[in-house]
Amino acid sequence: MGSQATPGEDPFNQETVSILRQPKAVWATAGASVVAFMGIGLVDPILPSIAKGLEATPSQVSLLFTSYFLITAVAMLVTGFVSSRIGGRKTLLSGLALVVVFAALSGTSSSVAELVGFRAGWGLGNALFVSTALAVIVGAAAGGSSAAILLYESALGLGMACGPLLGALLGDASWRYPFFGTAALMAIGFVCITAFLKEQPRPARKTSLLDPVKALGHGGLASVAASAFFYNYAFFTILAFTPFVLNMTPYKSGAVFFAWGLLLAVFSVLVAPRLQKRFGSLKVLGASLVLFAADLVVLGYGSHTTAIVCTIVSGALIGMNNTVYTELALGVSDAPRPVASAGYNFVRWFAAAAAPYLAPKIEEWSNIHIPFVVAAAASVLGAIVVWVRRSALSHEAEELEPKHAIEDGVTVFAD
């Protein structure tokens, strides 16, 4: 007999129990997701090293993010089309295989152009994997969709934390080694998915290439995507531009972004649900976006030490935002979750592609402070969209409050 919540007992302890009791297939998918998200922040500590090794400018090296996320955004229109025809398992494995190949090729690059091209192929593989992984975890996880989303956000946070650490440890010897290390880890993920994940049921209707775009016709989903677009511009200004501003060794930069990733994980999994339960999703999101904007302004105009502190603190705000945005995107419309996720990600990843390219350019056109002012303005615009469109989102925000049910004596979330 499992444990049951009693008066005075923290109900979130019950949520943790629910999240941890998962089938092997879920853990295999979540583990591979950790490595997939590691690939995003992996290059942070070694961006200056790559620029030096390939004799490139910061704006050229930042194209590593731009090509990666631009292809990821466009590929979001393809993921549902592919997975509804060949199944979730084969789609995950195809994505993993592409990441293994292009991550390894990235380590062999002899020019920035080659590396940017290989990162684009990596982005295609990551899109196939990440979008399908969320659908697989939500479909197979015990404890309902809320527990599944928290598990997915845990994987995201852990990957974001460990990516810079791995990049620093391997990149201290050579900027090429982190790419080879990622390829090896993703190959392990491929083996785990092959061994533990059975083929998932296919949807009754095959997804067309335009379904994610049509899903954005829903006012609520379009509002979430628009707000997330502005937020992601601010988010990836931190991720792609700040390493050049801090200008630290791989070890020191890796330590900063490891602490950043830890806060991201803790606030996305532990703090965000508590705040949502107390204040509601939209209030938490709006307040967090405004605080994020303030953090960016202080980062841009503060001392070097202040910039380090603000970079780390931003992880907490990003963690809260990620959780709320994911829940809203998956539940605000009547579209199937994979289709809604694809449409939402199609919009927001364009901002993730734009920020790494525009931030260094804005610095070249003005000064080092202005890229952070622009990012702060983007975060405020995201909050304004939430406030203006709150009527389209408020009903769903109420539904996202945790609903407890007792199954076999264990407190779980109802869908």
Image (tube, rainbow, N blue to C red):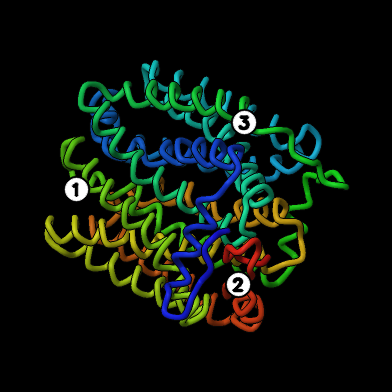
- Camera-near label (1 vs 3) is 3
Instruction: Give the left or right position of residue 265, taking residue 144 as reference.
Output: left
Between 56 and 8, the one nearer to me in the picture: 8
Residue occupying the point 45% across, 23% down = 183
Q: Which is closer to the viewer, label 2 or label 1?
A: 2
> Going by the image, does 154 lie left or right of 24?
left
Is residue 71 visible to the viewer in this orientation of the structure? no
- Give SS at disc 2: strand
The residue labelled by disc 1 is 246
Q: CB of mark 2 within 8 Å of CB of mark 3?
A: no
User: In whole angstroms, how far apart are the C-alphas of marks 2 and 3?
Assistant: 29 Å
- Label 1 crowd (10 A; few <14 / some 14-19 / many >=20): some
Q: Residues within 10 Å of mark 3 (few under 14, many from 20)?
A: some
- How many marks the image carries: the answer is 3
Name the foreground residue: 262 vs 182: 262
> Mark 2 touching mark 1, by CB under 8 A?
no
Q: Is residue 156 above or below residue 316?
A: above
> Residue 178 location, x and y as percent?
34, 26
Quick check: can you spot residue 286?
yes
Which numbered dot is residue 323? none
Which labelled disc corresponds to residue 404?
2
Percent x, y of residue 399: 64, 76
- The quadrant in which residue 367 appears is bottom left
Image quadrant in which the C terminus is located: bottom right
Mark-to-mark CA distance, 1 and 3: 42 Å
Quadrant of the image containing the N terminus:
bottom right
Residue denoted by label 3: 196
Q: What residue type is disc 2 on?
A: His
Q: Earlier in the sequence, mark 1 or mark 3?
A: 3
Task: Say which residue appears at 70% left-offset and 29% top-offset.
Answer: 90
- Separation (CA) of disc 2 from disc 1: 45 Å
